[in-house]
Amino acid sequence: MIAVENLTHKYGDRVALSGVSFEVRKGEVFGLLGPNGGGKSSLFRILSTMMVPTSGRATIAGIDVAKDPAKVRRQVGVVFQTQSLDKALTVEENLRAQGHLHGLSGAVLRERMEAAMERLGLFERKKDLVDTLSGGLRRRVEIAKALLHRPQVLLMDEASTGLDPAARRELSRHVETLRDKDGVTILLTSHILAEAERCDRLVLLHEGRIVAQGSPRELCARIGGDVVVLESAEAESLAAGIRERFGASAIVRDGQVRVEIANGHRFIAEAVEAFPGAVDSVGLHKPSLEDVFVRETGASIE
Amino acid sequence: MSSCAKRGHRLNSFILSAATLWQRELVRFWRQKSRVLSVVASPLIFWLLMGYGSNDLARYYSGTLVLTVMFSAIFSTISIIEDRREGFLLSMLVSPAPRTSLVLGKILGSATLGWIQGLLLLVFAPLAGVRIGLADFVPVIAAMFLISFTLTGLGFAIAWKMDSTAAFHGIMMLLLVPMWMVSGALFPMATAHGAVKALMWANPMTYSVSLLNYTLRLPNTGPGAAESLIVTVLFGIALLLLCGMIASQKATRSAA
């Protein structure tokens, strides 16, 4: 549904995207995960036809976003990171104006508005000024607005910014409903792990490059086993000792030693015994996307 | 679909998007009625001070109307800068509506607001000794709309590419206010120094002030009636085309 081939974008000398390629299948929730400044926003702007890339190609439903933006805009709904609602207008008025911009009017528009408000649970608030709505509700209005023209693809840029965890989960549920009930393909950018873990597939972006791609489960499986984090006053020498003795990958980050190893619980017992006094505290967890990101880039996402 | 029906559909969506933006400006304006005061009050105060100070309210009347319309145009176009960073403009930009219809809708909407606020000042016409008869009324309000349209277009052309409202304030003080000062609003062209006189001839706003002088039957030493009308109309058309072009450009940098 979305194909990105060798996309590169430069702002003057600064390279924002460098040879990025991936494909999004019809009807999946696809995530672009990475820290701020990793290239997500540039990619988002290109896909939403707000910006023309320096080189490479991106197509949505087979249409080139740089060559035929008007046609792409008919297929795509966009939810921005910043607000794109008119606060001085009501929910209904915002939706109606958006419908008009998409050439919808009369009974068709009314019916679409009702359906979108129903889907996003906004019906009771339709006469309210957007200014009086909570952050979570405003996001839902944004989504309702983006869906009026029945796009095949929904692009969402950091849509959960500024939402509390409950509102964020609620938003994720709405997104999944769109995928399951309406067959909408959704591409979202995020720097929030909990959100990325709910995607069907995702790419990890770092410094304008893709460092890994796959489903969250596949990505985490790359680490195989567990992640053990050890606190130590002499982290460097401890890491070196672990690498030598256990043959495991052990890196130091933020003064902690991170070890990827199978049967982490057994390793902990052995390590504490092998390096008496060197370990101040120990933690063990199943690999997360954060671990994948740290492993691929040495940097952290959030 | 036949090509004729297709063209009809395209025209329909052009009008629909322009109309919805126009309507949006009016609804917003109505909900923020206090904005009127800030736009109308300061030109009114300037006028009363200058007029009573020099004992000649009539001389500054047309200029005051233009200033009111200009302030309104500035307020409206500043909102473009705010709107594109965080606001409604973003969703306009990713909609399939033709950019030219968005430009037209936005300018017509803002121009209507400037026009309404300018019309409010017509209430004070008797103070300037101006009596607007029935026959004069239509030319006066038509001229006001035309002027409001051109000034909004000018503001739009400046604001569209700007990313900060601070920069717009700079341009306003360096360009728009001086333009107004040498438009015949403050002093007549006849007695102006040579260089200033040349500036006045080249200044499109001079023709706006003259146009109002004619329609209000006030004394005028600037360009003739036909000239004033033609220049103002051409200026409006040129700005509309320019805005259409500016807004249709493809961005290669971050737009928001």
Image: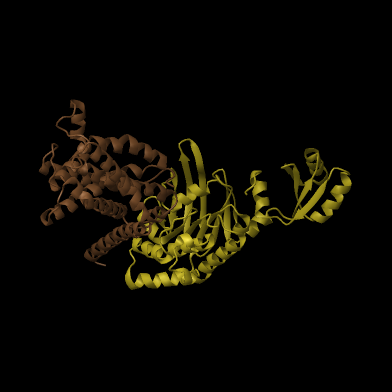
Q: Is residue A260 above or below residue A91?
A: above
Q: Is residue B237 above or below residue A116?
A: above
Question: Horizontal and vertical percent for residue A145?
Answer: 43, 63
- Residue B164 placement, left or right of B249: right
**Colour chosen for chain B:** brown
The residue at the point 33 percent across, 34 percent down is B174
- Residue A280 placement, left or right of B106: right
Which quadrant of the view contains residue A243? top right
Q: Is residue A286 visible?
A: yes
Q: Is residue A142 visible?
A: no
The residue at the point 64 percent across, 49 percent down is A293
The single residue placed furthest to the top in the displayed view is: B194
Question: Horizontal and vertical percent for residue A23?
Answer: 51, 56
Of residues B110 and A151, the one drawn nearer to the viewer in this rendering: B110
Of residues B106 and A295, the one drawn nearer to the viewer in this rendering: B106
Question: Horizontal and vertical percent for residue A81?
Answer: 50, 53
**Colour chosen for chain A:** yellow
Which quadrant of the view contains residue A207? top right
Of residues A292 and B98, the one drawn nearer to the viewer in this rendering: B98
Q: Is residue A141 above or below residue A219?
A: below
